[in-house]
Amino acid sequence: MRRGGPVAALPAVLLVVALTSAAALAAPAEGEPKAPPAPNGAGTQSAEAGVSVTITAPPAAAPAKVRTMADRLGITNMEKTVLDAVRDGSRQIDETGLYVGLGIAARAAGNIQLNPDEWPQLDRPAYVSLLAEPKLWRGRAVQTTVSIFRVTKLMSGDGLNYSDFWPKDHPVWRMDGVLSDGPAAADQPIMIFSVVNPGEFLGRGQPGAGKAEMEYTKGPRVRVAAVFYKNLIDTNRKGAVRAYPIVMAWQLSRGDESFASYASPPDGLLTRLAPVVILLAAMAGGFYLHRRRMTQMRQSRIQGSRYQSLRSQATPGGARDAPADPADRHVDPELAAALEQYLHQEGHDETKGTAGAAGKNHRG
């Protein structure tokens, strides 16, 4: 038997049969649906004949949790318990809930400073909703635009009580105004307790009746980011009993673009330009007075050169006959005529006397 015959070729035949069987087992049966391809390249792919490689796609990143305004306020369970105990429709403002609300607003003032794109995240509840559903809004962040007419600075022991929930050396500004968002704004009063000084947003006002009170007759508008507190029942200046929503403000901004029509803020553009405007006005006034005086002097010289006395008319030679005595300019004509007649008479008598004396001498 020759080497390399059928016996020698048996291992190669067995290898081919094994590979063919493996391929048949891996292929789906006829009529059986094929599995869809794995997304992102995941699944099993053939690298070489008879060799399989499994590729696993990385897990998708979990979506980031969107922090709501309630999350950013971070009201604690204790603060929520105190706010839930607040009574609406009473005449009492100064209660524990007031100082808890001020503490929430102060914390927000340090942690939440809204940019123009973030203001829409705040709810803008209707006025009737605040009055009808105060429990729904209590402790929630809201925004509103208010026309302010009075601001009172309060301190612990001077307008505020002492409380463990509010530092005694931190001032609070109470602002009284009306909503200026809707057509019925004049009939929608609101009370705001602000933890930030509203002076730079409202401008200069007029001293009010109280020692720490400022009044704003034009009602400048201010935009308020605040936490709703409660509804208060009180009597207005006309003696009518009304409900007043109360909010705790942590951020203020100008209410509109026409703020220049109101009192200018201390660091406003008009204040910085006021000295320049006054100087220009003074220079213009001085120039006008100088021109007027020069015009009057010029007219006086022209009128003086046109006036000539009848006795100072020019002679044919060009000279003017000036009177010997300035008093002659004011001699009464009748007196001058009488004087001339008297002098004429005296001269006639004197001539006659001289001639008589000469005759006597001649006769003698």
Image (cartoon, rainbow, N blue to C red):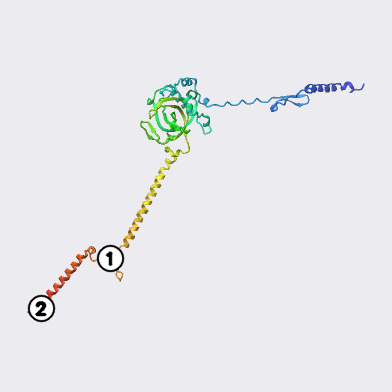
Q: Looking at the picture, how far across and down is residue 262, in whole percent?
A: 43, 38
Q: Disc 2 marks which amino acid?
A: Gly
View extreme (left): residue: 364
**Badge 2 element:** helix
Q: Tell which of 33 and 41 is nearer to you.
A: 33
Which residue is at the front of the view, 334 or 339? 334
Residue type of the residue flagged with mark 1: Leu
Q: How far, Cα to Cα, is label 1 from label 2?
A: 48 Å
Instruction: Give residue 278's quadrant in the image.
Output: top left
Residue 104 is marked as none
Q: Residue furthest bottom?
A: 363
Q: Closer to the N terminus: mark 1 or mark 2?
A: 1
Neighbor class of circle 2 (other Cα within 10 Å; few <14, some 14-19, many 20+) is few
- Expressed as whole percent of the image width and height from the top left, the position of residue 211 reads 36, 31
Asked whether residue 146 is in view, the answer is no
Which residue is depicted at the point 53% across and 31% down?
120
| The N terminus lies in quadrant | top right
Q: Quadrant of the C terminus?
A: bottom left
**Vertically, is 300 above or below 204?**
below
At x 43% / y 41%, what residue is drawn? 270
Q: Which element type, helix, strand or loop, lies under badge 1? A: helix
- In the displayed structure, does residue 106 sit left or right of residue 35? left
Q: How many marks?
A: 2
Residue 143 visible in the shown view: yes
Front residue (pair 283, 232): 232
Q: Residue 360 placed where, x, y %? A: 8, 77
Apparent side of residue 324 relative to residue 15 in the rendered image (left or right): left
Q: Nearer the viewer, mark 1 or mark 2?
A: 1
| Residue holding disc 2 | 359
For label 1, the residue is 310
